Image (spheres, rainbow, N blue to C red):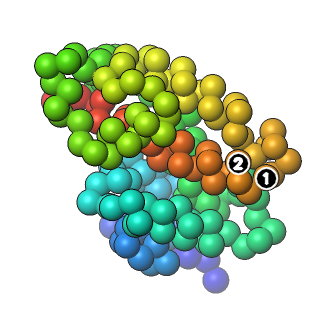
Amino acid sequence: MKNICDWNNCLEEGLYKAPVEKDNSKKYRILCLNHVKEFNKNWNYFEGMDDNQINEFIKSDMTWHKPTQSFSSSDNFFKILWNNAMKDELNKTNFKDHFNHMNKFKFNHKDMKAFDILNISAGIKWEKIQEKFKKLVKKFHPDINSGNKKYEDKLKVITLAYTQLKNTYRAKN
Ligand SMILES: [Zn+2]
């Protein structure tokens, strides 16, 4: 039996899992491709999560896959997140280019942690963050590392950090 997308009034086939609660990632909604993208755009991954919950999220995301499924499986919420991170949908008018010293206080501890994970200084230009992210993706992509799980885990942490900063740099108009 096919799943129907869980989005209001949508009749498309549901093929993608999206977490319902961040503290219990075993609960998920089944969504079609368009709506999982929509969901992904609006979801701030780190919001309201402490470090343990973030770790738990990363772990549970991996348990969603059957062992035979690879990182590149389509039934993988993380892949959508990753694809979104890879896309240069960074219209300059929608993003703050950088934060100056005066408004650095706008960063919360999750932002600071994300800067730390990416090993870049807080408040640098968005362009530089992208550059660094792409460098790290090349380094840690499991396809380049014979599907090594450790690299996959690392890439997930990097992508979550990048997504966190993307949300922060997105200008709140
Ligand atoms: Zn849908």
Q: Which residue is mark 1?
A: 148
Percent across and percent down for residue 61 are 56, 65
Residue 6 makes an appearance in the image: no
Q: Are marks 1 and 2 in contact (CB under 8 Å)?
A: yes
Q: Quadrant where the N terminus lies?
A: bottom right
Give how far across and how far down residue 152 sits, in percent: 68, 51
Secondary structure under tag 1 reads: loop
Count residues near mark 2 (Cα–Cα under 10 Å), then give few for <14, some for 14-19, many for 20+.
some
* Residue 155 visible in image: yes
Q: On screen, 148 above or below 129? A: below
The residue at 74%/57% (across/down) is 149
Indicate the position of residue 16 as horizontal and vertical percent values. 56, 63
Determine crowd level at label 1: few under 14, some 14-19, many 20+ residues with C-alpha closer than 10 A: few
Name the image quarter holding the C terminus: top left
Tell me the residue at 37%/36% (across/down): 165
Q: Which mark is residue 151?
A: 2
Q: Nearer the viewer, residue 13 or 54?
A: 54
Whether label 2 lies within 8 Å of ligand 1 gets the answer no
Helix, strand or loop status at disc 2:
helix
Q: Nearer the viewer, residue 117 or 73?
A: 117
